[in-house]
Image (cartoon, rainbow, N blue to C red):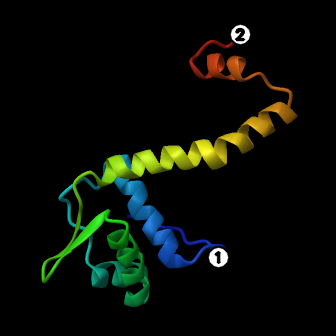
Amino acid sequence: MTIGWNDNTPIYRQLKDKVIGMMLDGALKAGDALPSVRQVAAEYQLNPITVSRAYQELVDEQLVEKRRGIGMYVTEGASEKLLASERERFVREEWPAMLERIRRLGLDVDQLLRRQDGDKS
């Protein structure tokens, strides 16, 4: 896990988003263990409370489960749940802003899609 922190978002949130990204990318799959709180805190020079807060939010969202004495593990169906919610958020929040920008620039969505598919016409 490589992380470049930014000052605009709390670190626990950035860490949580990084773990979510790893789940969506398939780097963390159902049943996989997350690195320990102490390991992440030491590696990134973070307060263990910061790491615990990020992990607790993942537990609260039922993406990760605590197994007493052995660690935190990605739950079954976590990536599917994330994918569905991320798609919904994209369509609700990001896509309208993208469409507005496309319109402002006078671009044609169909032409952009064809170009993406390799047709440069």
Who comes first in sequence, dot 2 or dot 1?
A: 1
Dot 2 amino acid type: Ser
Q: Which mark is residue 16?
A: none
Residue in front for this viewpoint, 17 or 90: 90
Residue 70 horizontal/vertical position (percent): 13, 78
Q: Secondary structure at mark 2?
A: loop
Q: Secondary structure at mark 1?
A: loop
Residue 77 horizontal/vertical position (percent): 26, 51
* Residue 117 sits above or below residue 99 on the image: above
* Residue 98 sits above or below residue 48 on the image: above
Left or right of 14? Residue 23 is: left
- The residues bearing labels 2 and 1 have C-alpha atoms spaced at a distance of 42 Å
Which residue is labeled 2 in the image?
Answer: 121
Residue 18 horizontal/vertical position (percent): 44, 63
Q: Residues within 10 Å of mark 2 (few under 14, many from 20)?
A: few
Q: Which mark is residue 7?
A: 1
